[in-house]
Structures are given as structure tokens and as C-alpha cells.
Amino acid sequence: MMYDRTIRHCRQCGAAVAYRLPDDGDTKLRAICTVCHTVHYENPLNVVGTVPHWGDQVLLCKRNIEPRKGKWTLPAGFMELGETTSEGAARETTEEAGAQFIMEDLLTVMSVARVGQVHLYYRARLTSDVFDPGHETMEARLFTEEEIPWDELAFRTVKETLEHYFADRRAGHFGTHAFDIA
Ligand SMILES: [Zn+2]
């Protein structure tokens, strides 16, 4: 999910920006407009998703879009303005898998500072094993832990989240796991 977030043009006036230190004692380079001097601050984006489960199986989606086209992932995507993290995770699950489910508790919170993102995954209990995936997904299907294509997963955050899900399931108790992805 790495991508270029460099700001090139001012959001106020459209002029070119230059990356330099602001005059107010800030110690980080900021995108500053060369004409109107507006300082553009950049903050991390939230990626929200679910671990949809059905009996001893979880739902994975085969990506039909870059990056990692053809690799397997959990339903997830960028949170939209105006929605909660749980609402965003539910929306992505509906869009990418066309699944029917009930949202449950937060499972993982992962800071991915390298790409300026925070990923949050909720457990979601499927109420049907019939799926109607959207255009971003080639195929949506259920896997037991033994069937998970561990070497064909799209993202490290997905792998770590699945590992926590199955470990908690074996332990008979689900928690919330907050950690960093280097
Ligand atoms: Zn400007």
C-alpha cells in the first residue's frame, strides 16, 4: 500500500509548493506554498478492515487491483470522512466481498509509520457463506487456518492479523492487539 503522497501544489491557491522548515520553530520539513505561504501538514491515513469468520473458516479476497493484484487479503481500505472506524471496516467488507455479517470487537491496531498509515481490523461474524464480490475482488472464499495461503498474502498487516485471530481462537479468548509494523 506504499504510494507517493508528496504534495506538489497548494490546496489554497494552486501554486507550486516547496518543502522547507516553517518559521515557527517546527523541526519537520513541510510543504509550503511559494506564493501564499500556506503550510500543508500531512497526517497518517487509517486503513480499516475485518476478519470475517464462518465456523472455523475466515473469508479472504483475491485482489483484482494493484498493488499486489492476484494476492489474497482481508477486506480493508481507506477510511472515509464522516464514518467511524467500525463503519468504514463494514463498508469495505460489503464493497469488496459482498458479505453478510455482524460486526464484532477490534482485533488489531497496527502503526505502519514507514508509509504513514494506521491499520485497524475488527472481527466480523458472517451470517451467510454466499458472497458477491465487487470489482476490486477476483474471488472471495473461505479458508480454514491450514488452508490459508500464507505465502500468497498481499500485506504483512493481513498476515499478522490472521496470526492473532487464529492464536486467540485457539486460546478461547479474543483480545485487542496494538503493535508496530517496521
Ligand atoms: Zn498557495
Image: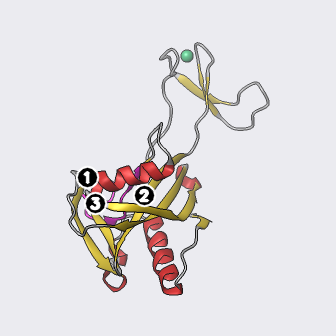
Q: Is residue 105 magenta-colored?
A: no
Mark found first going from the N terminus, 3 or 1: 3
- Residue annotated with mark 3: 99
The quadrant in which residue 80 appears is top left
Q: Quadrant of ligand 1?
A: top right
Looking at the image, which residue is at 29% across and 55% down?
Answer: 96
Mark found first going from the N terminus, 1 or 2: 2
Residue range corresponding to the magenta coloring: 62-77
Q: Is mark 3 within 8 Å of ligand 1?
A: no
Relative to 18, is 106 above or below? below
Rounded to the nearest angstrom, the CA distance separating label 3 from label 1 is 14 Å
Q: Are marks 3 and 1 in contact (CB under 8 Å)?
A: no
- Residue 28 as seen in the image, left or right of residue 40: right
Q: Is mark 2 within 8 Å of ligand 1?
A: no
Marking on residue 176: none
Give SS at disc 2: strand
Looking at the image, which residue is at 71% across and 27% down?
Answer: 22
Residue 122 place in picture, x, y as percent:
47, 62
- Residue annotated with mark 1: 136
Q: Of discs 2 and 3, which sits in the foreground?
A: 3
- Going by the numbered disc 1, the residue's amino acid type is Glu
